[in-house]
Amino acid sequence: MIARHNPVDVVVVDVVVVGAGVIGLGIAHTLAQSGRSVTVVDAQPASGATYAAAGMLAPVSEFHYQEEHLLELMRASAALYPEFIASLGLADAADAGYVRSKTISVGFDSGDRAALSDLRAVQVANGLAVEPLTIREVRTLEPMLSPRLSVAYSIEHDHQVDPRRLTACLRQAIEGVNGTATGTATGTATGTATGTAILQNAVALLHEHPLDLTSRVIGVVLDDGSEVRAGDVILANGLAAATIAGLPHWLDLSLRPVFGDILRLRVPDQLRPLITATVRGLVRGIPIYLVPRNDGTIVIGATQREDGSPAVSAGGVYQLLRDAQELIPAVAELELIEMTARARPGTPDNAPLVGRVDGIAGLVIATGFFRHGVLLTPIAAQICREILDGGADDRWAQFRPDRFSVSGHRSPATASGTTASGTTASRTPALRTPDVPMERAHD
Ligand SMILES: Cc1cc2nc3c(=O)[nH]c(=O)nc-3n(C[C@H](O)[C@H](O)[C@H](O)COP(=O)(O)OP(=O)(O)OC[C@H]3O[C@@H](n4cnc5c(N)ncnc54)[C@H](O)[C@@H]3O)c2cc1C
């Protein structure tokens, strides 16, 4: 049960997590399992990018030129997934929509063939397994694929999870753990540790010295003016992270919305299973993916727009259906049940912002997961737990959240693709033609 917070209360817990998307919930679950009392605050849990996400866990096929710095993080998180799912205590991992089926990558024309072959060379050079399939082999595996394909590869280790089911399971698991935990309050205010989730947004950070925004963060103020006091605050509210009051003025999180349109369709009984593997295709150089779910639906995605519009794009829907049908002609016979648009939390170097802010005790930031937040949830949770435990893996220091901040505290980031002023670097997708009317995302 989600606890409703009485405005006059002050809740005191070990950790308050702001944001109940897949990242915030994953972190809260891991921290609750470590014995900490945890409260998650979010007026609309799992309603952001997580709601739209296809849930591909794809460190191999998501590996892009110019994003080599992400590969180790993505592989580490993919390796943690089985253990992360097991920690939910489900009777069956499929209850969270976790399916370890393979991914197949296909293309049509000579340009697609060359692009996929070049990409495979880079993937293999980086130690990733991408095996060629003959057209006969791929059509034996997936008979509904178009006979006009000219190239195919098999990627055994790219799997999927259903983000909506995963977040539902995470919420249940958090309540299960915290429902029996006795909160070891570390704050100084009076109050009791209650519930595990509060259906309100946080509006401001509470500082030990209210006029000093670099002093220790000791909690958050909620919409209704009530407070959650905590030893640590984890800011995991996606794109909105930079808008919370009480962050120091010099901290530049450089988040930007990268919108994506995505479709859900139901496969009629006579066509099931339409596909058994996740199919990623290039159609005239434009990437598209189809992800089959156990419930007989498929997810088709996704566009990538920076036009500022949160509405579903008609042009985007048209292009997705057109290209999906080219890949699998029977797509025309499916029932279109949902069109969704959400914004991915992008950063200048496409890498997340995760870690402590230099010089500010009590605050950890975990946002900017862009196209990979579902995949990166277990590693984000592990990084946060290690930070709170007092240790942190040096490999992830490059993702510190203050790397774009220009101040006495931090120099500008020098990560690949990031300019000294923190402006957006070129993010040309690996595979696209110059006349594409709307970018297509690989996520
Ligand atoms: C079309 C599309 C397809 C995608 N496909 C994939 C994929 O296949 N694989 C993959 O790994 N990733 C994918 N992604 C990316 C993934 O969805 C994101 O990286 C991930 O969801 C980010 O999670 P998050 O929890 O940081 O943010 P969100 O899911 O956006 O959650 C943020 C939460 O914070 C809450 N919030 C906001 N402000 C406040 C506040 N002030 N106080 C409290 N709470 C607040 C919101 O209500 C929301 O619930 C996709 C994204 C899109 C849009």
Image: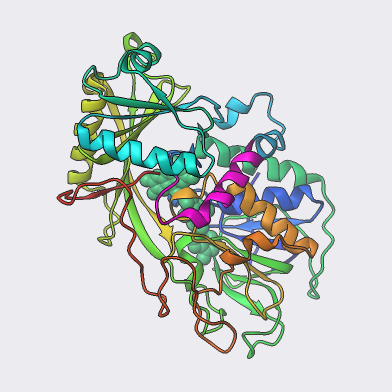
| Drawn side of residue 12 relative to residue 368, left or right | right
Q: Number of callouts in the render?
A: 0
* x then y, percent, for residue 238: 49, 60
Residue depicted at 19% across the width and 32% down the height: 322
Q: Nearer the viewer, residue 294 or 380?
A: 380
Q: Is residue 383 visible?
A: yes
Direction top: furthest residue: 270
Look at the image and say whether residue 76 sits in the magenta stretch: yes
Q: Nearer the viewer, residue 409 or 198?
A: 409
Vertical comparison of 31 with 321: above or below: below
Look at the image and say whether residue 291 sits in the magenta stretch: no
Residue depicted at 21% across the width and 33% down the height: 110
Quadrant of the snapshot with the N terminus: top right
Name the dominant secondary structure of the magenta segment: helix
Residue 39: quadrant of the picture: bottom right
| Drawn side of residue 172 relative to residue 238, left or right | right
Vertical comparison of 64 with 192: above or below: above
Q: How is the image coloured?
A: rainbow
Residue depicted at 39% across the width and 52% down the height: 65
* x then y, percent, for residue 213: 62, 85
What is the magenta range? 63-81
* x then y, percent, for residue 126: 51, 45
Residue 418: quadrant of the picture: bottom left
Quadrant of the snapshot with the C terminus: top left
Q: Is residue 14 visible?
A: no
* x then y, percent, for residue 280: 36, 33
Residue depicted at 51% across the width and 50% down the height: 373
